[in-house]
Amino acid sequence: MTLWTTVLMASAFAFALKLLGYVVPHHALDGVVVSRVTAMLPVALLSALVAVQTFTAPGDGLTIDARAAGLAVAVTALLLRAPFLVVVILAAVTAATLRALGWG
Amino acid sequence: MPAPLSDQRRNEVLRQCLSVGVATGAYGISFGALSVAAGLSIWQTIALSALLFSGASQFAVVGIVAAGGAGAGAAAVATSSLLGARNGIYGLQMSRLLGVRGLRRIPAAQLTIDESTAVAIGQPEPAAQRLGFWGTGLAVYVLWNLTTLGGAVVGDALGNPQKYGLDAAAPAAFCALLWPRLRHGDARAVAAIAAVIALVVAPHAPAGIPVLVAALAAVVAGFFPPRTPPGRDGLAGPGSPPDQEATR
């Protein structure tokens, strides 16, 4: 699948899902299980993305490198209620600094 | 039609719309920069913000493409769509609130995201709910796309993503998106189990697949009764995550 195909297919599915809520009968998606699975999906997916993108490297299995330090700094910033952009920049600066010093 | 708003209430709601738009726009910069660092072109980055228009899904697409290249496209689309499923539930709530019919459902659907839903359901009266939805949706759409462009141009000029730690910025961005959803014990348990599943699967599967397998944690959790009492921001309501920006 080319990058453009990926971009356009992801966009088409995203729009179809949004529109679904406006066109299905109102009772169709009601239900405790549907609500709970839908609320939990972002939690599971985002957490898995954090784990995979911090602790794995392509072809290298599990690793701990400068990204782990970046994540630790990001979590600390979130605990201190820093805004989104500050969290992201602090993580990047941490990893970049450690690499410049020759670690990770 | 609902009763019209007083000037004072109208201004209050519009101020809220704009502040949510500005707060969200600020992380459009990081999206734009990460996207070009992942290997997408500036136009592909802009297309994601204009067409897909759902932050977490967009970050997922570029994150998975960054790790697995164009070959991980199917996994990227699947993860993006699972993340976007909640927008369908928001749409269901919003269609009751907005009373849109016919072709107006198309712009309403496109603007149905965490932030517009949160501001709308945060208003007590129907006219303010409608203004909150459209105002926030439009403010976020315009600012998100402008800042995406800015971030993409800057990211393109920076070059080598590792030198600037952009590969560490991606998990930090996911973490910041996850953070406001972890207020309940149930959510924290799901997050922990999903992370473990993903790391166990990761060494044995191509890029993107571990994250999809981890989504099973959410499906299993959905069949258990909630341990936290349902409420306006309880897990029993699909509106639980979106008040992240509105309350900041």
Image: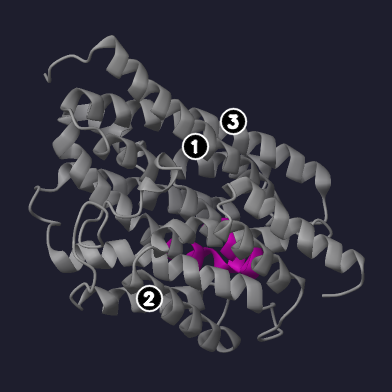
To the question of a shared chain for discs 1 and 2, the answer is yes
For numbered disc 3, what is the local secondary structure?
helix
Which amino acid lies under the numbered mark 1 shown in the image of this protein?
Ala
Which amino acid lies under the numbered mark 2 shown in the image of this protein?
Val
Front residue of B221/B226: it is B226
Tag 2, which chain? B
Pointer 1 and pointer 2: residues touching (CB < 8 Å)? no
In the displayed structure image, the side of residue A17 where residue A21 appears, left or right: left
Visible residue check, residue B89: yes
In the displayed structure image, the side of residue B94 where residue B179 appears, left or right: right
Which amino acid lies under the numbered mark 3 shown in the image of this protein?
Leu
In the displayed structure image, the side of residue B107 where residue B209 appears, left or right: right
Residue B75 belongs to the span the image colors magenta: yes
Residue at image x 55%, y 83%? B199
- Give percent across and percent down for residue B69: 64, 65
Q: Earlier in the sequence, mark 1 or mark 3?
A: 1
Mark 1 vs mark 2: in front: 2
Q: Residue furthest front?
A: A80
- Displayed quadrant of residue B184: bottom left
Residue located beneath label 1 in the image: B50
To the question of a shared chain for discs 1 and 3, the answer is yes
Count residues near mark 2 (Cα–Cα under 10 Å), then give few for <14, some for 14-19, many for 20+. Answer: many
Residue located beneath label 2 in the image: B190
Residue located beneath label 3 in the image: B146
Q: Quadrant of the N terminus of chain A?
A: bottom right
For numbered disc 2, what is the local secondary structure?
helix
The magenta span reads B61-78
Q: Earlier in the sequence, mark 3 or mark 2?
A: 3
For numbered disc 1, what is the local secondary structure?
helix
